Image (spheres, rainbow, N blue to C red):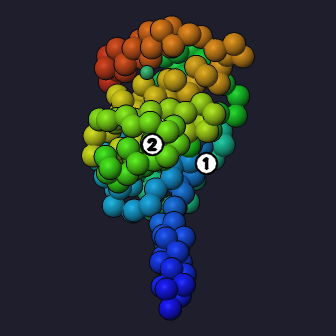
Amino acid sequence: MKLKLLTICLFFLVSIPVFSQQFELSTIFSKIKYKDETDVKEFNKKIKSVYPLKGLDVILNYKYENSFNELCRKIDGLILRVEEILDMHPVAFKINIKIFSSKKDMEKYFLKEFGYRKKDLIAFYVPAKNTIYVRIDKINEHILAHEIAHAVINRNFLIKPSEKIQELLCHYVDINLKKTHPENVPY
Ligand SMILES: [Zn+2]
């Protein structure tokens, strides 16, 4: 009887991840990973600017085939804008952006991956996973652009610049992003 109870408990423990399914939105330069559609809608509200795709969409005749066209368009525009500010254009750049629904979820993931706790994180980039992690309640386009800049810099150099140089370049992106007046390009 005790053994049976233990088996049932183990089943529940093992089966939890099966129910937390992850979905994916593919844009030209990113893959947005999420668990809850509400987070994607919120992400679209948080990323306000629409930067031009500079003819690339016309050349590739790219059509976003999902119900979140506006967000996909904004993310690709922001990535191109960051590349333009840095004057770095890594070939075949495609970054994963994973959305966390809450602070708790993000901190839990961080602890699991890195083995120590980090509090009050809003976003971070992990080069080995080619992924930017964002917390939906606190993210904004400047924080996202900062992390995109880290990703572009990391992909652009064979020998990576030091953390200090990277932070300087990311800060440069932030200053120039604030100066930019986005064009409201229809997508
Ligand atoms: Zn940074």
Identify residue type, mark 2.
Leu
Q: Nearer the viewer, mark 2 or mark 1?
A: 2
| Residue 63 x/y as whole percent | 57, 53
| Residue 182 x/y as whole percent | 35, 29
| Label 2 sits on residue | 111
Residue 162 seen in this snapshot:
yes
Image height check: is 49 above or below 157?
Answer: below
User: Mark 1 Cα within 10 Å, few/some/many (few <14, many 20+)?
Assistant: few
User: What residue lies at 49% left-to-right and 46% top-to-bottom?
Assistant: 112
Image height check: is 120 above or below 17?
Answer: above
| Residue 177 x/y as whole percent | 37, 21
User: What residue lies at 39% left-to-right and 62% top-to-bottom?
Assistant: 37
Given the current orientation, which residue lies at the most extreme front position? 2
Q: Nearer the viewer, residue 82 or 56?
A: 82
User: What residue lies at 42% left-to-right and 25% top-to-bottom?
Assistant: 146
| Residue 82 x/y as whole percent | 48, 24
Label 1 beta carbon less than 8 Å to ligand 1: no
Q: Secondary structure at mark 1?
A: loop
- Give the image quarter of residue 39: bottom left
Q: Nearer the viewer, residue 62 or 1?
A: 1
Identify residue type, mark 1.
Tyr
User: Mark 2 Cα within 10 Å, few/some/many (few <14, many 20+)?
Assistant: few
| Label 1 sits on residue | 62
Query: In screen coordinates, is 87 left or right of 98?
Result: right
Mark 2 or mark 1: whose residue is earlier in sequence: 1
Label 1 near label 2: C-beta < 8 Å? no
Given the current orientation, which residue lies at the most extreme bottom position? 1
Ligand 1 picture quarter: top left
User: What residue lies at 52% left-to-right and 61% top-to-bottom?
Assistant: 23
Q: Nearer the viewer, residue 142 or 65?
A: 142
- Give the image quarter of residue 123: top left
